[in-house]
Image (tube, rainbow, N blue to C red):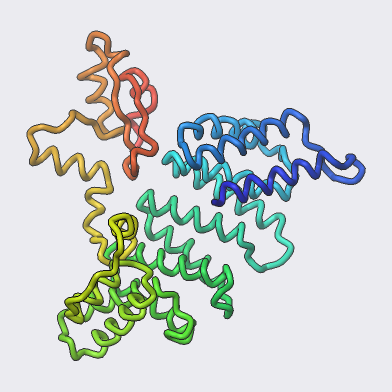
């Protein structure tokens, strides 16, 4: 969704510049840059649906935004959106490390263009996208810092405003990141502080309520059903269940209240779609990091499984790869699947020959 928004913003600015003379506008975009920008936007929008368009889009964005050093190829007011769209396209195919650079450039231009201290929705979207890239890279503490910044800058008394919605999502994600690093106490503190700022249940987002209720339940489960925090957990889970925001919270609420008539779904499609987001709940075991981290997973399986595809951890084992395969017949044609340590959903995977792999890595790197 952000792709379309950013693309529309850049395109309108390009058209506006083309419509006025240089005496009126401080900068005129050359026809070649304008054409390349339009093509990059179109490819990025296509990549949002079909990632096969992303590589060409990224090459175009690079040629527009990165080739000429400190030159600004577009009007200053268009630069935040241009870098944001480039970042989103990189993230679409798992290139989150590169996306972080573009997110930061986008935020830098937001600062240069800022007319007031009030955060804009476009800037909040970039900060949220940056936090998601950090999460996917398993940099949870860094993600928490960004998410707390969003929350502090999006404070608004109006519950229906985009500020409140953005703040709720930031709080929910910050709490989840704390759980991912096995810090349940910090997660509860983040959620409870937000609850207090919304005058408890009056304006509390049901997803946040469900997450806080589930977190309190995890903390209080050993204290018995008469414990105050346990009763509070059930109350919050009921609030989330009544709002039907997630089947996880409805399911847990009905389990702890021992209701036998629980049937929240009316079709298999609803069940599948709802539970597909279950890993955004407090019940996503932090120990799953051992599966998310490809290096850890590779080591675990190698220790206990006889059949597992041969693999090397690079750059640490580059010398072993070179020693064992570079001298083989047709080693230049032998292909490998390169997976990022924090890769997900096959995004960012690269197929390369032995020769190409060896040229990518320096064994002296950490």
Residue 191 makes an appearance in the image = yes
Question: Who's the residue at 60% across and 31% down the image?
Answer: 60
Point out the residue furthest to the right here.
Answer: 23
Q: Is residue 59 above or below residue 268?
A: above
Quadrant of the rendered image containing residue 132: bottom left
The image shows residue 331 at horizontal and vertical percentages of 27, 13
The image shows residue 93 at horizontal and vertical percentages of 44, 39
The image shows residue 241 at horizontal and vertical percentages of 33, 75
Point out the residue furthest to the front here.
Answer: 266
Question: Who's the residue at 48% across and 41% down the image?
Answer: 49
Residue 190 makes an appearance in the image = no
Q: Nearer the viewer, residue 289 or 234?
A: 234
Question: Who's the residue at 21% across and 81% down the image?
Answer: 220
Q: Is residue 87 above or below residue 142?
A: above
So how many labels did they put on this image? 0
Q: Is residue 241 above or below residue 16?
A: below
Q: Nearer the viewer, residue 238 or 153?
A: 238
Q: Is residue 36 left or right of residue 204?
A: right
Question: Who's the residue at 69% across and 45% down the image?
Answer: 10
Q: Is residue 342 above or below residue 263?
A: above
Q: Is residue 201 left or right of residue 157?
A: left
Quadrant in which the C terminus appears: top left
The image shows residue 201 at horizontal and vertical percentages of 42, 84
């Amino acid at each position: 969704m952000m792709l379309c928004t950013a693309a529309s913003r850049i395109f309108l600015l390009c058209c506006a510049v083309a419509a006025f003379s240089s005496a009126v506008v401080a900068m005129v975009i050359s026809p070649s840059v304008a054409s390349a920008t339009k093509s990059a936007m179109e490819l990025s929008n296509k990549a949002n649906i079909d990632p096969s368009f992303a590589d060409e889009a990224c090459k175009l964005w690079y040629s527009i935004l990165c080739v000429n050093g400190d030159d600004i190829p577009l009007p200053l007011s268009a630069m935040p959106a241009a870098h944001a769209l480039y970042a989103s396209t990189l993230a679409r195919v798992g290139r989150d490390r590169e996306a972080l650079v573009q997110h930061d450039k986008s935020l830098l231009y937001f600062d240069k263009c800022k007319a007031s201290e009030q955060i804009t929705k476009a800037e909040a979207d970039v900060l949220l996208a940056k936090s998601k890239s950090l999460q996917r890279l398993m940099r949870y503490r860094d993600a928490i810092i960004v998410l707390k910044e969003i929350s502090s800058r999006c404070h608004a008394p109006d519950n229906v405003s985009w500020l409140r919605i953005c703040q709720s999502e930031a709080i929910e994600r910050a709490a989840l990141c704390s759980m991912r690093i096995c810090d349940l106490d910090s997660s509860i503190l983040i959620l409870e502080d937000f609850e207090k700022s919304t005058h408890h249940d009056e304006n509390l987002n049901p997803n946040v309520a469900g997450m806080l209720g589930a977190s309190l339940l995890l903390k209080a489960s050993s204290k018995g059903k008469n414990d105050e925090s346990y009763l509070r957990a059930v109350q919050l889970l009921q609030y989330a269940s009544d709002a039907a925001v997630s089947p996880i919270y409805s399911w847990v609420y009905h389990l702890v209240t021992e209701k036998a008539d629980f049937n929240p779904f009316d079709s298999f499609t609803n069940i599948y779609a709802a539970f597909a987001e279950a890993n955004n709940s407090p019940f996503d075991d932090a120990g799953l990091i051992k599966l998310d981290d490809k290096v850890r997973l590779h080591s675990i399986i190698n220790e206990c499984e006889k059949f597992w595809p041969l693999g090397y951890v690079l750059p640490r084992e580059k010398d072993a790869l070179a020693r064992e395969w570079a001298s083989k017949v047709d080693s230049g044609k032998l292909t490998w699947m390169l997976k990022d340590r924090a890769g997900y959903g096959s995004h960012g995977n690269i197929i390369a020959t032995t020769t190409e792999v060896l040229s990518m890595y320096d064994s002296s790197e950490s």
